[in-house]
Amino acid sequence: MLTRNLLIASLVLNVALAAAALFFHLDNSSLQEQRQALSAARDQAIAETKTLELNVQAMQKKLNALTQAAELPEDESKERLLKDIAMKDEMIAALRKALDNSNAARQNQPQRPERRQRDRDIPRESPEERMERMRTENPERYEQMMTRRREMEERIAKRDDFLNAIDVSKLPSAKRQAVTEYRELLRANQELMQSAMQGDRDSGREMWENQRAINDLSAEVRTILLEQYGKSIGAGGAQLADQVNQILEATSTGFGGGNFRGGFGQGRRR
């Protein structure tokens, strides 16, 4: 029980580490996204203001033409036209005010000191450069991160070894497809996580989408593996518990979970 609790705690820590790494890279560009959103809103306000100004000019020309031709419409129509022009003027004034507020917000937008420093660093520091700087400036923290990374990679390798050792050829078609898809999703997510940790934001988004699919398949695959093992070579007591625990770890939804010894019939205690 203590060993399993330690494994679960280790899995949670590694999920948190991977999530923190992804958040760090996504957070680096959050300020740029805010600026782009403000810029887009500003451009839209400018375009709408220009459109309204053109509408007012057209309506004014129409009114002038009617006046010059002495073909003024009835008072009600004339009044409605003047009200439309006044309303357009008010809309233009409101848009200009919103545009001024947008410009002021951009200028007064607070920035954390570290963000301001990153903005001044051109070109931006790459993840590899940050790690190299950490290795020089904070070797203790660097070694801790590298140790955790190695441990996570070892757990992932053991998980993959266990899942890849499973013989799916004897499974029914639907179950074979579920296990195969589960393994492919895990493999793809591992590659995406590596890209995300290098700063690829698109890989980070796709990774979390894949993770939802993994979560959906996890319980189904766990049941399939337990059923398959129950039909395999008989094992009782500690042997059965050991194999069941391996299956549970193999179907966990974390990025680096699992302390695996092989597929069915492998890694059995003697």
Image: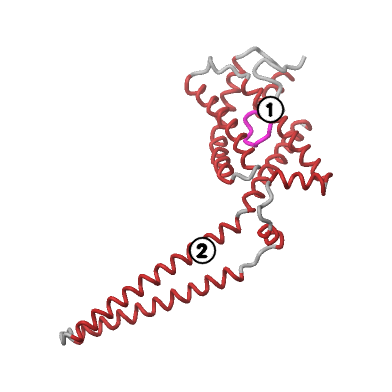
Residue drawn at point x = 48 percent, y = 64 percent:
41
How crowded pointer 1 is (Cα within 10 Å; few <14, some 14-19, many 20+) is rated as some
Residue 83 falls left or right of residue 206: left
**In the foreground, 245 or 77:** 77
Location of residue 260 in the rendering, given as x and y in whole percent from the top left corner: 70, 25
Location of residue 218 in the rendering, given as x and y in whole percent from the top left corner: 58, 32
Residue 147 falls left or right of residue 219: right
Q: What residue would you read off at disc 1?
A: 157
Residue drawn at point x = 16 percent, y = 87 percent:
70
Kindly indicate the quadrant of the structure image that contains residue 185: top right
As measured in the structure, the alpha-carbon distance from the residue carrying label 1 to the one carrying label 2 is 46 Å
Location of residue 61 in the rendering, given as x and y in whole percent from the top left corner: 26, 79
User: Mark 1 or 2, which is nearer the eye?
Assistant: 2
The amino acid type, in three-letter code, at marker 2 is Ser
Q: Secondary structure at mark 1?
A: helix
Question: Which quarter of the rendering shows the C terminus?
Answer: top right
Residue drawn at point x = 56 percent, y = 24 percent:
224
Q: What residue would you read off at disc 2?
A: 39
Location of residue 181 in the rendering, given as x and y in whole percent from the top left corner: 53, 28
Stretch of the chain drawn in magenta: 250-258
Q: Is residue 172 magenta?
A: no
- Number of marks in the image? 2
**In the foreground, 134 or 10:** 134
Kindly indicate the quadrant of the structure image that contains residue 154: top right
The amino acid type, in three-letter code, at marker 1 is Ala
**In the foreground, 138 or 229:** 138
Q: Is residue 255 magenta?
A: yes
